[in-house]
Image: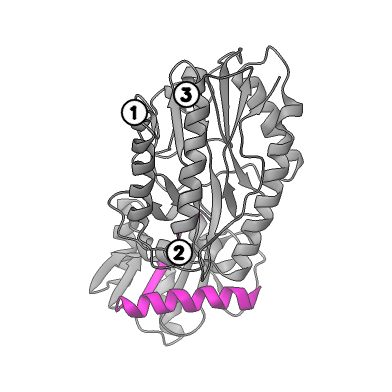
Amino acid sequence: MIQELRKRWNALQQALAREGGDAILITTNVNLFYVSGRIFSGAAYVRLEGDPLFFVRRPVGLKGGNVIYIRKPEEIAGHLQQRGIPMPAKLFLETDSISYNEYRRYEKIFDPRVVCNGTQLLRGVRSIKTIYEIGRIMRSGVLHARLYERIPSLYRPGMTDTELSIEIERESRRLGSLGIFRIFGQSMEIFMGSLLAGDNADAPSPYDFALGGAGLDASLPVGGNGTPLTDGTSVMVDMGGNFTGYMTDMTRVFSVGKLTDRAYRAHDTALEIQRRIEQTAAPGVPAADLYNLAVRIAADAGLSDYFMGHRQQAGFIGHGIGIEINEAPVLAPRSKEALVPGMVFALEPKFVIPSVGAVGIENSFLVTDNGVEKLTHCEEAIVPLQ
């Protein structure tokens, strides 16, 4: 694992050098996991040269020459001085993720000339996966697909969306799901994913997901809301695939009875969008171009009013995935990012058809030197539940 971590440290040091930075202090769980291979309470201090230093409060028992136990962050400065490490003139902090009080505390401890946004620097580095990380994502994809293949056997006539969701969540845990769905952003929340049936798929959500759903309570307004799974209803399953600490994202659609012709046509259009983007996506292709291609195909099919929502439409058709479910790049009209080999993204062209529900597709893709490779393999047609 140490060789894997060194690759990540080197990538982070190269990013620091490009930005003229001296060091980055990392304190959030996701990024601590990225740079250390585990989660601990404390901080990782990554410099331009040398291995990172890990300042640990909890748990006890971690060992290594670069592990230093502290009671409070103020002790970090003294440890750096003891090791002959100069204080940074340009320090990066996770300013998109830490509180104002934490920011001021670290600013006082290090007294840098300038503080910069380390959150975006880290997200940029993490967007390009190592071979090890790709392997972890692929393994999640295999188990994710295995879960979806079992969904028809979990359905029973008379179920509500919540009852079916519970059975899928249980099966997911039986297959090894870690049960957590990490999301970037303080205003983003979800449980293990969402199941949307019928018109609940058209319920606007405050969260920046492709589709919302009213949820079971105002405290978590996303996903299933107890909708009965009745004849003519579509059932869109968008459960997270976190089996390894690295996630895949995959959506499949099931039906109770027969859906309307418009619903099947919209689903076929989503598959066509996926096919065209698979053909187009390659290193150097701007993420915004892929979004615009999807919008044109939906418009040519006369389905713009239903694309990425009906009452409320999402402004993207894909997003990076990894340790978190919403990483870089984002396939959106104002995205400044271009595809790079090693990126992994979820593509999710979806439609909401009133009185029927949501249809469409979502798969995870790896950007290779020559194009993209699909990582989530499972039946893509609408699968009848009865």
Q: Provide the residue designation for mark 3.
A: 262
**Residue 277 at x, y percent in the picture:** 45, 52
> Residue 282 — which label?
2
- Name the residue: 45% across, 22% down: 214
Which element is circle 3 on? Answer: helix
Is 245 included in the stretch rendered in magenta? no
Q: How many numbered marks does the figure carry?
A: 3
Sort mark 1 into few (<14), some (14-19) or many (20+) by Cα contacts within 10 Å.
some
**Label 2 with label 3: CB-CB less than 8 Å:** no
Quick one: label 3 or label 1, which is nearer the N terminus? 3
Which element is circle 1 on? Answer: helix
- Name the residue: 46% across, 62% down: 127
**Magenta residue span:** 1-29
- Name the residue: 48% across, 20% down: 200
Give the amino acid at mark 3: Arg
**Can the viewer see residue 77?**
yes
Q: Provide the residue designation for mark 1.
A: 305
Give the amino acid at mark 1: Asp
**Residue 180 at x, y percent in the picture:** 59, 43
> Residue 119 — which label?
none
Q: Nearer the viewer, residue 312 or 265?
A: 265
**Residue 305 at x, y percent in the picture:** 34, 28
Q: Nearer the viewer, residue 12 or 292?
A: 292
Q: Nearer the viewer, residue 209 or 346?
A: 346
Is 21 included in the stretch rendered in magenta? yes
Quick one: label 1 or label 2, which is nearer the N terminus? 2
